[in-house]
Image: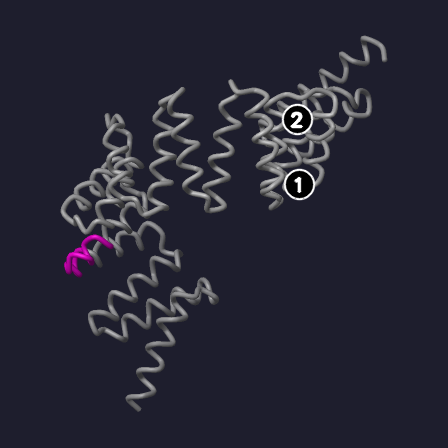
Amino acid sequence: MSIMEKEKAVALNNEGARHFLNQSFVKAEECYLKAYAIDPDNISLLNNMGLFYQQQKSISKAINYFEKAIAITVKPHFLVNLGNALSMDGNYELAWKKYLEASERFPEHENAKVSMAKLATHIGKLDQAVHLYQSILESNPSEKHKVQLVKVYMKMKAWEKAIQLLNTLDFDGGEGELWFLVGQCELQLKNFGLALKYFKSALAEEPDNTSFRHYLAITYLGMGNVEDGLDQLKKNERLAPENPAILTDIGIVYLSKGDVETASNYLKKALNIAPDFKKALYYKSQINSAQQKQN
């Protein structure tokens, strides 16, 4: 292959990468395929093609190109990318082996161990995920890794550990997600006053976040403050009027208040949007059963 041909393949690969970043996926694929026809052993191109097909959910193609790149040169990010594609394909055992290989061969490549921790979390091996994140934090005590460990503790229902770790983070504004995590832990511990405080702090950062407001509503309801809880749910309805989960939650609160007619109307709205929404179907059937017994 001539130098000019190699340079043309490199240029097409770079052009494809630019199109990919700009989400011009048809053009990106055209450039990658032209480059591959010229230089099928270009490892940067092979990796880019793997990433492209992974993004396009053509996982078997992605795996193929990552494997081609690794067959030529073993690089840690190639192994991690292959592991990610295998994980997306549900092949968790082989994905783990690729992450482990990357971690052992390239111990300085932090992302391999992070990927292992994420996979362990996903498949429910939470103790292993904790161990991995703790190991990562020993060499890089970054806040993003601490937050991931917090989320693992929360999956384990280790609320006190999660709060202790959250208290080591820097809450200096713009941290609505962190306040939200603390609020969830305090809510689970039945510390309703603290939960209210933290959910309100989260909403002060992101007033249109329906998840934050949902948990604020749940906290009010848990305290027996139905009207304030309902008020927060209705604010969510204004923010997302086509969300069946929000409509269903409002219906359930009205049902708890004994207002069956209003509850039914909200559940009907939810089911008009999402006819298979299980939670709405369940409470609608409960109302129907109660009405049939009365008749």
Q: Residue at x 28, y 33 (%)?
A: 165
Q: Nearer the viewer, residue 73 or 232?
A: 73
Q: Residue at x 43, y 37 (%)?
A: 129
Q: Residue furthest right?
A: 1
Q: Nearer the viewer, residue 242 or 195?
A: 195
Instruction: Kindly identify which residue carries mark 1.
Output: 59
Q: Position of residue 195 (x, y in %)?
A: 19, 45
Q: Residue furthest bottom?
A: 295
Report the span colored magenta. Answer: 218-228
Instruction: Report which quarter residue 121 is drawn in.
Output: top left
Task: Indicate whether 122 appears above or below 49.
Answer: below
| Sequence-wise first label, 2 or 1 | 2
Instruction: Report which quarter residue 31 is drawn in.
Output: top right
Q: Secondary structure at mark 2?
A: helix
Q: Nearer the viewer, residue 278 or 116?
A: 116
Render colour scheme: one colour
Q: Residue at x 63, y 36 (%)?
A: 54
Instruction: Kindly identify which residue carries mark 2.
Output: 48
Amino acid type shown at disc 2: Asn
Q: Residues within 10 Å of mark 1 (few under 14, many from 20)?
A: many
Location of the N terminus by quadrant is: top right
Task: Indicate whether 149 appears above or below 157.
Answer: above
Instruction: Report which quarter residue 99 is drawn in.
Output: top right
